[in-house]
Image: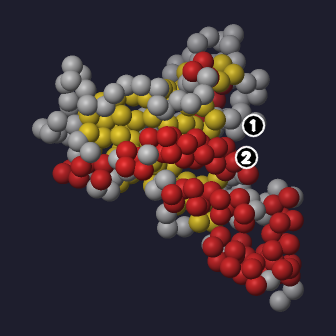
Amino acid sequence: MHSWELGQSSIFLTTPEASRLALACNDLSTFLENVVADGGFGNACQLERAKFSRGLIWLHPIVSLKDAARFAVCAHSLRLGGGATFTDQSELRSLSHILQTEAAYASRVGDVVDTFSKRFLFAWKFDLERIVDLLENRSLLEVVSDDVSFTCRHGISFALNLAVSKASFQTSELTFRFNPVKMIGECRSSVEIKTCGSIIVPDPQRSVVKLEPVFGGTRSPQSPAIIADNECDDSNPLAVDRKSSTEWLHFSRLLSIVRVHIFPISLCIAPISLRT
């Protein structure tokens, strides 16, 4: 098989498989490096050019094997749950920046404390028509994503969604925020939930915007077990929740990494399932 044919065939391999094959074939390694330098593999399905989850790493169509490995190792060390598809290198690079920030947080609080954090990668889903109306100044109505639900042990479930808004027709600034945590069904246990995270916003640079943490649950707010502080934000607080751009791209999805803290901590030790 010629090196070009081998290289094209590698798109059907997972990234770990392609990496092992590239170690044994210099021509394939060179081919993949050149493809990434040229912008990645051409793909008829441009909206799903790469994927990542715990069970599937398929990143080499858009980034180098070295960058794919670095992302996968960091995601594994942070026990990243969920999964998403990517359209280009800039999305994955922005997500890598979020993971680096999360790794810095984990290092700061220590392994024991960070064990009780759960991180999830997923895409918030929006009604495209309503988003276009907002971006094209046909409406100032806030646009809210579909709910994303989380299920813990003992059947305890809660949901989150993300709101996008604009203050006036004259501004180019969008505001992104979590809506309050919503408990699903009846929960008689005393539970406190804290969520924080970041999103990739739809500007040409695929910039990262951090979100203000939100709290919820059934525990009395007069006796919180989870302290509200600035642990989720290592950057300029003025940059949180909002972003200006002269060229917003139309979108129906926003990639995000969300960190969840739950008290009592026994709920965080057990697996938490995600449904988007």
Q: Secondary structure at mark 2?
A: helix
Residue drawn at the location 80% of the way across and 69% of the way down: 32
Residue drawn at the location 61% of the way across and 23% of the way down: 236
* Depicted 107 relative to depicted 33: above or below: above
Q: Mark 1 touching mark 2, by CB under 8 A?
A: yes
* Quarter of the image that includes the N terminus: bottom right
Alpha carbons under labels 1 and 2: distance apart: 7 Å
Q: Amino acid at mark 1?
A: Gln
Closer-to-camera residue (257/160): 257
Q: Is residue 254 visible?
A: no
Q: Rate crowding at label 1 as few (under 14), some (14 to 19) or many (20 or more) other CA atoms within 10 Å.
A: few
Instruction: Tell which circle, 1 or 2, labels the residue nearer the N-terminal end.
Output: 2
Residue topped by disc 1: 205
Q: Position of residue 100 (x, y in %)?
A: 60, 46
Residue topped by disc 2: 90
Q: Residue furthest left?
A: 188
Closer-to-camera residue (144/234): 234
Q: Position of residue 30 (x, y in %)?
A: 86, 72
Q: Rate crowding at label 2 as few (under 14), some (14 to 19) or many (20 or more) other CA atoms within 10 Å.
A: some
Q: Residue furthest bottom?
A: 1
Q: Amino acid at mark 2?
A: Ser
* Depicted 56 relative to depicted 143: above or below: below
Q: Position of residue 248 (x, y in %)?
A: 71, 29
Q: Position of residue 158 (x, y in %)?
A: 30, 40
The part of the image, by quadrant, that contains residue 8 is bottom right
Residue drawn at the location 24% of the way across and 49% of the way down: 266
